[in-house]
């Protein structure tokens, strides 16, 4: 599946979201929200983000998630992928600078599309401007 096709999914769980507006997870999620995506914030340290209820983990989200957009260090990716498999997410997206080949392979074997080392905001701008 192409990145352009993946960007047609609209429900995005942002794992590792921050309430600090200078952090990439914050401004990327805000951009996506402003461009029609439903953002589900995931961070056990936050109660809410931008007025949205924040969940401690993927398993706590009561609705279907299309894309799991991950803002965590590469070594923290495997348990997030395990959760993404359990909730039957369609895509695991590891942001720019985040690569974990083992976790990617595990997700793919479970039928989940994987994007690594790419910023969802940058990709969105690239494809929406075509």
Image (cartoon, rainbow, N blue to C red):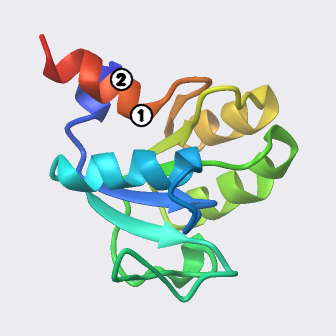
Q: Are marks 2 and 1 in contact (CB under 8 Å)?
A: yes
Q: Secondary structure at mark 1?
A: helix
Q: Which mark is residue 123?
A: 2
Observer able to see residue 58: yes
Screen quadrant of the N terminus: top left
Residue at 37 percent of width and 74 percent of height: 50
Residue at 41 percent of width and 34 percent of height: 120
| Above/below status of 56 relative to 20 | below
Screen quadrant of the C terminus: top left
What percent of the width, then of the height, locates residue 117? 62, 23
Observer able to see residue 90: no
Relative side of 96 to 74, left or right: left
Query: Is 114 or 44 nearer to us in this picture?
Result: 44
Classed neighbour count for the residue bearing mark 2: other residues with Cα under 10 Å, few (<14), some (14–19), many (≥20): some
| Above/below status of 106 relative to 58 | above
Query: Is 46 or 9 nearer to us in this picture?
Result: 46
Relative side of 8 to 53, left or right: left
Residue at 20 percent of width and 52 percent of height: 34
CA gap, disc 2 and disc 1: 5 Å
What percent of the width, then of the height, locates residue 25? 54, 51
| Above/below status of 126 relative to 122 | above
Residue at 52 percent of width and 39 percent of height: 93
To which residue does mark 1 refer? Answer: 120
């Amino acid at each position: 599946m192409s990145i352009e096709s993946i960007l047609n999914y609209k429900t995005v769980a942002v794992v590792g979201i921050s309430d600090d507006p200078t952090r990439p997870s914050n401004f990327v999620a805000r951009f996506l929200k402003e461009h029609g995506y439903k953002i589900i914030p995931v961070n056990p340290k936050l109660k809410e983000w931008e007025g949205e209820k924040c969940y401690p983990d993927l398993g706590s989200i009561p609705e279907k998630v299309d894309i799991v957009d991950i803002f965590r260090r590469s070594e923290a990716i495997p348990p997030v992928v395990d959760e993404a498999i359990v909730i039957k997410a369609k895509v695991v997206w590891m942001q720019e600078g985040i690569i974990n080949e083992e976790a990617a392979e595990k997700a793919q074997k479970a039928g989940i599309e994987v994007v690594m080392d790419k910023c969802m905001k940058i990709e969105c701008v690239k494809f929406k401007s075509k």
